[in-house]
Image (tube, rainbow, N blue to C red):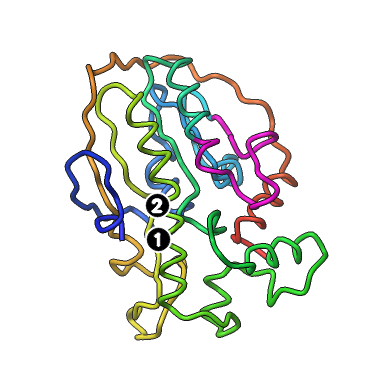
Amino acid sequence: MFESTSQLEGTLSSRVSKGSSTVEWLRANFDGRDLRDTVYVTANPQLEENRDRWDIQLHKTINVWLDEGWDDETGTVRAETMTEAALEAAEQFPHKRLVVHYMQPHYPFVPAETDFDKKHLQQIDGEGDGPSSENVWNQKFKGELNISRDELWAIYVDNLQYVLKYVEELLTDLSGRTVVTADHGNYVGERASPLPIQEYGHPRGLYDDPVVRVPWLVHEHGSRRNIRRSNIQSSNGVEMETVSDRLRDLGYRE
C-alpha cells in the first residue's frame, strides 16, 4: 500500500518490525535502551500507558495527544498537528534524533467518506446508535460492519495519502537523514496463520507479513546534524484517566 501510494523522495525498501502492535514495538525498541540522544514526539498514548513497567531513558517525550493537540471531532491527533509539533521539536532540540509517531493511517480514519467513525465516538460519549464502540477492524472481523473489503481498503489508502502529505512537509524542513517507516502493519482481509482465517487489524501474537513487514524509506536532505546525548528532561505527570480515554477513542479498548 505504501509503495503504490507514496510519492516521497528517497530509497524505499522494507524491514520486519519487532512487533505486530505499538506496545510490542515500543517495548522492543525503547525499553532498557540509552536514548538520551532522542526526543519522542508522539500522537500515541501507549508509552505513558506502560511507562511504569519499562525502563525509559529518552531525553524528552512530547505527548501531542494531550490537551490542545487532541482533536475531539475525529478522536485522534491530526497529521498537520503532528508535523507542526515535530518542527517545533526540531527547532528546540537541534542536536537530538527525533522519533515522530503519527497515528495515521491507523484508525480513526480522518478523511473517510463514512459515518462509522462518528458513530464510534458517539457511543464512547454515551450517545448515538452505532453498531459498536469497537474499532472498525474488530467490527469487520466480527461481521458487524456492512462494508466490503475493497471499500475499507480505499478508505485506509485515503488515510495514508492524508498523512503522507504532512510527512512530506516535515521532510522538506528536517536536515540530515530521515527514515519514514511504521511500528506495525495491518491485516485488511488477508489470511492469517497458523489458522487460515480472514483477519482485520493487528492483533498481538500474529506475525504474518501484513502486520510486521513495514516500509523503510530513507530520505537525505541537507547536512547531517551533530547528535548528542544529555540528561533526561523531566515530564509533567500524565493522568491515567486521560490515557485511558485517548486509547478508547483510538479503538484500543472498549
Residue name at image x 66 percent, y 37 percent: 66
The x and y percentages for residue 136 are: 56, 70
Q: Is 18 contained in the magenta span?
A: no
Q: Quadrant of residue 157?
A: bottom left
Which portion, as a residue range, is magenta? 62-82
Dot 1: what SS? Answer: helix
Q: Quadrant of the C terminus?
A: bottom right
Q: Is residue 67 magenta?
A: yes
Residue in view at x 22 percent, y 16 percent: 223
Q: Secondary structure at mark 2?
A: helix
Q: Quadrant of the N terminus?
A: bottom left
Q: Amino acid at mark 2?
A: Gln
The residues tagged by marks 1 and 2 sit, at their Cα atoms, a distance apart of: 6 Å
Q: Position of residue 152 (x, y in %)?
A: 46, 72
In front here: 83 or 210? Answer: 83
Callout 1–callout 2 Cβ contact below 8 Å? yes
Count of numbered circles on the image = 2
The structure residue drawn at horizontal position 82% and vertical position 65%, both measured from the top left corner, is 127
Say which quarter of the image contains residue 154.
bottom left
- Amino acid tagged 1: Val
Residue 157: numbered disc? 1
Q: Count residues near mark 1 (Cα–Cα under 10 Å), then give few for <14, some for 14-19, many for 20+.
A: some
Residue 217 percent coordinates (x, y): 24, 43
Label 2 neighbour load within 10 Å: few <14, some 14-19, many 20+: some
Residue linked to disc 2: 161
